[in-house]
Image (cartoon, rainbow, N blue to C red):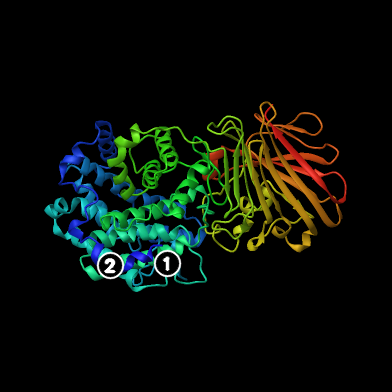
Amino acid sequence: MLVEFIPSLPRTLLPPARFRPFPTAAQRRRWEELPDALRASWIAEGERFLGWQWPQLTATGFMEFARTGNRSNFERLSFARRGALATLVIAECVEGEGRFLDDIVNGIWAICEESFWGVPAHNYGPEPLPDVEEPYVDLFAGETAGLLAWTHYLLKERLDAVSPRITQRIRYEMRRRILDPYLERDDFWWLGFDPNRRVNNWNPWCHSNCLAAFLLLEDDGERRIAAVAKALRSLDIFLATYHNDGGCDEGTSYWSRAAGSLFDCLELFYTATGGAIDVYDRPLIAEMGRYMYRAHIDRDWFINFADGNARVHIAADLVYRYGRRIGDPNLMALGAYAHRLRPVSGLRHQDSIYRDLAAVFNYAELTAAPAEPPYVRDVWLDGIQVMAAREHGGTSAGLYLAAKGGHNDESHNHNDVGNFIVYVDGRPAVVDAGVETYTAQTFSSRRYELWTMQSSYHNLPSINGFQQLPGASYRAENVTCLQDERMAELSMDLQAAYPPEAGIERWRRTVRLVRGEGKARVEVDDDFRLTAPTADVVLHLLVAAAPVERGAGTIRLPALTIRFAADALQPTWEPIELTDARLQRVWGDTLWRVLLRVTRPASEGRLRLTMARE
C-alpha cells in the first residue's frame, strides 16, 4: 500500500524550508487568532512551570526496574520532564513574549543530558543501566525526539537569540541518538524486518516521531528520502498485521498508539509531500479508524478486551481529524463528543506535542462540531472475532453486549477466548477487569501468573480444574455471528482454547442479545460434552457491584438480574480487593467474582445464564 510511493519521493518530498505544518512562534498571526479561552488555558498551564525544579533522574532510580520490577517511579519523573517542556513550548508560542524561554532552555538541557531517552523497561540488555555507546530507539526515545524536533522547529530563532548552543545541542543529540541509528540499523524489532517477530503499536508510534525528526531536522536530502522510504516499507508490515475489519486486537486503550499513530504518520506523509501521499480512501485505513466508535459503549466506557482500560480518555482531536480525513461523520462525532466530556483545559491533553499542536489549531472547529456519538446497534469484526450489540441503536439506553472469539496469542493477550461483557444503560455490570499497572512481570514469562490475565478471572468456565492456556493454537473454532432486528448472537467452540487434560470433547458457547420491548435479555448457553462425568465445572462471572442472592437461581446486581437453573448451578462469590492504582481509577476498590459450580457430576449437558433488567 505505502511502498508504491517510494519511487516518487525524490520528486514529491518537500525540502525542510517548505515543510511548514504549523506556524512558528515568530509567525504571530495564527497564534494570536486562537480563541481567548484556549490561549488563556495554555498560558496558565505554562505558568505552573515558571521556575520549575526539573526532577532529577538518578542511576539508582533507573535500576529500580531491574531490582524490583517497578517501572512507574522512574517513568513518572521522566514523563513529568517532557510534559513540562511541551507545555512551556506551547505556552511560549501562544503568548509570544519570551517569558517561558529560560525554563524551556533548562528543560532542553536537562533532557539532552540524560543518558537514555527511553525508559528502564525498554533497556534491552544484561545490565541494569543503558549503554550510552549503543543508542536504542524505543517508544519514549522516539517521543523525546519528536518533542525536541518540534521545539527546535517552533522556537529556533528565539532559542538562538539566547544562545546558538541550544539548537546545536538538540541537533547533535538527535543525530547520534535517533537519526543515525534509525538509518543504520534494521534490527530494532519494531521495524518488522525480522519475519519471526510480530509488530504492534510500537511500529507506527516510533515511526511517527522518527519521521518528524527527519522531516524537521535532516538537511541531507538523500538521508531524508531514505528515512521516509524506510518508514513506508516498515509501516506496510504493520498494516499487514491487520484484518480487513480494521479491528485492534491490542484493545481500545492502544488504538491511540496503533491506528492513531499510523494516522500521525499518514498526516506527516501527506503534509511533507503536498498531498502526494494520500491513502485516506483505502478501505483498510478507514476501517482502522472506525474501530473506535464500533468499540464505544457510552461516555468514556469502551470494550476493553486485552490490555485495555474499560474507561478511556480518547485523544478527542485525533479521532475527529481521522474521521474528517476518511469522510466519516460518525468518527468525527465521537471525537467531538469526547472533547465535550473532557474539554481542553491545559496540560498535554493529546499525549504528544505534535497532537497538541494539531489540536490547538483545530480547536475552534472541534468545539463547534456535532457531538452526538453514533451508538452503532450491531458490530461484527470478523477478523479479530469481536461482536457488539445494543438493545437499541442510536442510544446507550438498554442492554449492551460484547463478546469475543479469537485466540490466546493476540498482542497484549489475555487468556479470554469466549469472554463477554454486559452493560446496562451505558454502565458496567458484567465486566472485564483490564490490566494492572505494568511491571517487569507483565511482559515476562510469568505474565499469566497475574490474575487479570487468567481465564478464570474472565467470564469463562474452568473445567476439571483447568483454565485456558496462552498461544495461537488455543483458539475459538467454528465461529459464527448472526445479527438481525430480533437478536445478535456469537457462537463458537471453546474446546481448543483449553489443554487436552481438561477432558473436553465439545464446548459450544453461544452468547446472544435478544431484543424486544420489555423482554430484552442476554443469554449465555454452554453446550458441552466431556470425556468423563465430573462435578468440577465452574462458570465465572466478574461483576462491577456486590451481588445479592434473591431466591434460588437468582442473583441481583444493581441494574441486572442473573438467572440460572438452581438445580444445576450453585452460586458463591468473593470480593476482589483492588490495590492497584490503574484498576482503582476504573473500578474503585472492589470487583466481585461470582462462581457458579455445577451441582452434580455430568459428562454432557447445557448450562444457561439469562441476564435482564428488572
Compare residues 564 and 388 and report the one nearer the observer.
388
Give the image location of residue 502, x and y in percent.
78, 59
Tell me if mark 2 has few (under 14), some (14-19) or many (20+) residues whose alpha carbon lies within 10 angstroms of its own: many
Which image quarter: residue 92? top left
Of the numbered discs in the image, which one, if any, rests on residue 225?
2
**Is the N terminus in the top left, top right, bottom left or bottom right quadrant?**
bottom left
Q: Is residue 380 left or right of residue 526?
A: left
Compare residues 351 and 245 and report the one nearer the observer.
245
Per the image, the residue denoted by label 1 is: 191
Question: Taking the image as drawn, is residue 176 in sight?
Answer: no
Give the image location of residue 22, x and y in percent.
23, 48
Q: Secondary structure at mark 2?
A: helix
Q: Is residue 277 left or right of residue 139?
A: left
Q: Amino acid at mark 2?
A: Ile
Give the image location of residue 28, x and y in percent.
16, 42
Q: CA distance from mark 2 to mark 1?
A: 17 Å
Q: Residue at x 38, y 66 (%)?
A: 3
